[in-house]
Image: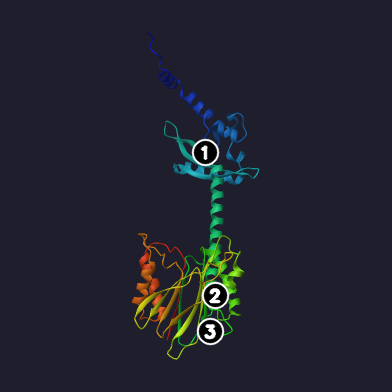
Amino acid sequence: MNKPENTELDENSMLLKASPKRLFESLMEQTADRIYIKDKQSRFVAVSQALADMHGFADRHELEGKTDFDLFSIEHAQQAFDDEQKIIETDKPLINIVEKETWPDGSTTWVTSSKAPLHLNSGKLAGILGISRDITDQKLAQEKLAQSEQRLREQNAIMSADYESAHKVQSVMIPGRVPKIKNINIAYLWKPMTAVGGDLVNFPRNPNNCLLFYLGDVCGHGVTAAFYTVLLKYLTAHQGEVYQDDPAAFLNAVNKEITGLLKSGFVTGMAGHFSRREEDGSRTLHLSNCGHPLNLVYRAATKTIESIFLPTGMVMGLPGGTASDKFNLKLEKGDRFYTYTDGILEASNPAGEEFSRQGLEDCLLQHADQPIQETLNILYKTVEEFTGTTDQQDDITLLAFELT
């Protein structure tokens, strides 16, 4: 039985028997890298076929005796020559440097290049051994990526500036003019989730000079929702000019104008006005809502919080929607009325627990002895402490009135 021939051993034997010169020639003929040996005057002594091909020479030996000045632009050739002379002077290599190659026709390529001093067996410095690898495609891709990143940074800077400008404008617009009414303290809290938001507070002027207010919450967040607050600000101001002591008619008129303008969205809203002050300091608050039925009242006489459930009206912006019938709420001197968007109730902590209506009631009751604006400020700080590291998930807006 014949023993199988060990092909791998035979191949290794062939390599060992080959002369160093033949191995060197095979390397220079077959490698994809640009390998070269130069003398101390930076003249090519030997080059790989890949390098010759790069310069348009079919025979690599044709490059022997030439220099970079014969192949590249003067700018690149001079830089390469200076680098190589420094290697010869210092006897120190340059490893993995990135070189920009400029050609006589004006084109540009990029390589990573390593150059080292070449010593003969005697130890005497004979020249330079170098290897270059083309990275033009990689470099161009990096430059394209860098340009894209720069454009993105510029666009982000523009967007950030636009956001900041929009925030300043919306901060002035919401609530805008806050009326000063004798014996009524007004407070509000407006904290959008981002630089701009979809919550709106407005106090439209009206023919009877009563305290008329509107609180709205546009579905969604950010710039799109903020655009609709501008529209709602205008529409509520316009309807305020013809207000006839009927918050339901007011909301229905606004709804008629906005229906069909909100693509796949809607608005919840609340409107109301205060009647004239009675001799005992009480007033009646006339209310109507569109999908915004929950409110709170602090009763000064009993030091308690009451939930006020209004008749539910349909949200604004959808065909056929109507506001709830007018609801009359009697408030006594010292009482406070709170209305708000749902962002404060849904504020969550890292455990996923919501601040909730109970948390809102507890905080308002606990700090009812504070001025009404300070009560809202404390409330927001309490919400921040509750949510901790959790990002704000919705716009937070509260509107409060106190009879004095």
Q: Which residue is mark 2?
A: 248
Give the residue type at disc 1.
Answer: Ser
Amino acid of disc 2: Ala
For the residue pair 136 and 303, the one nearer the viewer reads as 303
> Could you say which is closer to the camera, residue 148 or residue 244?
244
The image quarter containing residue 299 is: bottom left
Assess whether mark 2 and mark 1 are in contact (beta carbons under 8 angstroms): no
Q: Position of residue 277 (x, y in %)?
A: 47, 88
Q: In the image, what residue type sits under mark 3?
A: Cys
- Looking at the image, is mark 1 or mark 3 nearer the viewer? 3
Q: Estimate how packed mark 3 is, as few (under 14), some (14 to 19) or many (20 or more) residues with alpha carbons within 10 Å.
A: some
Label 3, secondary structure: give it. Answer: loop
Depth check, front residue: 85 or 404: 404
Image marks 3 and 2: residues in contact by CB distance under 8 Å: no
Residue 210: which disc?
3
Tag 2 secondary structure? helix
187 over 18 or under it: above or below: below
At x 39%, y 62%, the residue is: 390
Real-space Cα separation, disc 1 to disc 2, in angstroms: 80 Å
Q: Which residue is mark 1?
A: 132
Q: Quadrant of the N terminus?
A: top left
Answer yes or no: is residue 199 visible: no
Q: Quadrant of residue 257?
A: bottom right
Q: Nearer the viewer, residue 214 or 64?
A: 214
Query: Residue 251: x, y in percent?
Result: 56, 73
Between label 3 and label 2, give the one nearer the viewer: 2
Left or right: 357 as drawn, with respect to 242: left
Q: Callout 1: few (<14), some (14-19), or many (20+) C-alpha neighbours within 10 Å?
A: many
